Image (cartoon, rainbow, N blue to C red):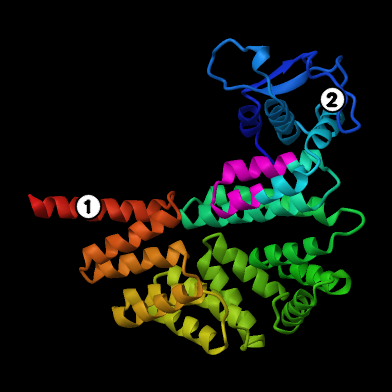
Amino acid sequence: MASNAESSAGIANILFIEMPAALAKDFGGFSPDPAIRIPVETAGSGERFDPATITWEAIVAGMLRILAWQPDHEHAAYYRSFVKAVRPAIFGELSEAGVAKAWSKDWGIAQEVFLALRGLFPEAPEPLIDLAVMYEQRAESALAAGKDDEADGFNVRAFEAYKLLLAMEPPFPPAFYTAGLFFLRSRNFERAKSLFETYAKIGDDEEKIARAQEIARKLGQQGYLDELFREAYDLIRLEREEEGLVKARAFLEKNPEVWNAWFLVGWASRRLGRWEDGRKAFEKALELKAEGVDVLNELSLCLIELGNLDEARSRLEAALSLEPENVKIIANLGVLSLKRGRREEAAGFFRTALEIEPEDAASARWLAQIEDMDGEAGL
């Protein structure tokens, strides 16, 4: 789940040494083996290493890095026993630290913490589900920044993590619910339905069980599993909009009340520059109780091109009320303000988007254009 480059960087400052005699004593029921060299985290500054400066923290940190990036190391089992003896409460400590780092989008450290926990407790499902969710978050962040290929890569990592989770024995119920949401977002409706149905049977959270049953029911009743729908979605995603549009309309002839199908029609129409067709399709989706902000956002793009800027603003603000930190929505509000000649207001939106997602390339480009325009005006 980690790249070779990440693994190499993760152990770059690790030095293997013999266990210092002063530290080679039993602790916590564990007896160190002096014959096994131990990894120690160093500063990596190029200065000569002084064994006298070794601390327990450096040893534990070194072992955690090896377990994170080289979980199949020949002495992995020994390092696990060592760390657990030195830090018996480490599972909870690292779990909290990893979640906190993921929440603050400090992705690199969060990933290393979750990988270390997985290496330290290979049978525990919690680090793996935290890792999967984090990869989903990274994919969403990359997508918001216009980095589609990078987003695909992180979604693949999430998929790999969910495969391992779902194969665990005994089954870990939360994995089926969380993976169901992942496959639902990925438009793999058949897989999502199966996972939600399984969770409804083995889960213990009544609220989530009810939600899983409702989602599975909708997926079964509203035609989401229809081959035409899947084909339409895939064709549009692959930029074969005309073919996708034909499939989507054919699906609607059989299932006119499925809002997602109207979304597909609107999505393809918008990408083809057929703004009025797109507007009508998105409004029909909303009439059928469409969920999420994508419909509102896509509708606003059509409205902007049709010159209905006031309604476009209203739709974007409605979307923002649902997801206040959605970078795509904030950036589109900036684009709308710029079209109305409100450069200062637009710059404010783009700066806000960049505060939430510093790698949002589109907002950075728009902001640079505004600054260039202001500079020229000043001249």
Q: Is residue 45 above or below residue 80?
A: above
The answer to whether residue 11 is magenta is no
Please name the residue that numbered disc 1 is placed on: 371
Residue 74's disc is: 2
Q: Amino acid at mark 1?
A: Glu
Classify 10 Å Cα crowding around label 1: few (below 14), some (14-19), many (20 and above).
some
What span is in magenta? 97-116
357, 62: nearer the viewer: 62
Residue 205: image x %, image y %? 80, 73
Q: Is residue 62 above or below residue 94?
A: above
The answer to whether residue 208 is left or right of residue 2 is right
The answer to whether residue 36 is left or right of residue 267 is right
How many dots with numbers?
A: 2
SS type, badge 1: helix
Q: Amino acid at mark 2?
A: Glu
* Res 232 → quadrant: bottom right
Residue 218: image x %, image y %? 72, 82
SS type, badge 2: loop
164, 282: nearer the viewer: 164
The answer to whether residue 3 is left or right of residue 264 is right
* Residue plotted at (74% across, 54% down): 129
* Residue plotted at (40% across, 75% down): 316
Could you tell me what secondary structure mostly forms the magenta stretch?
A: helix
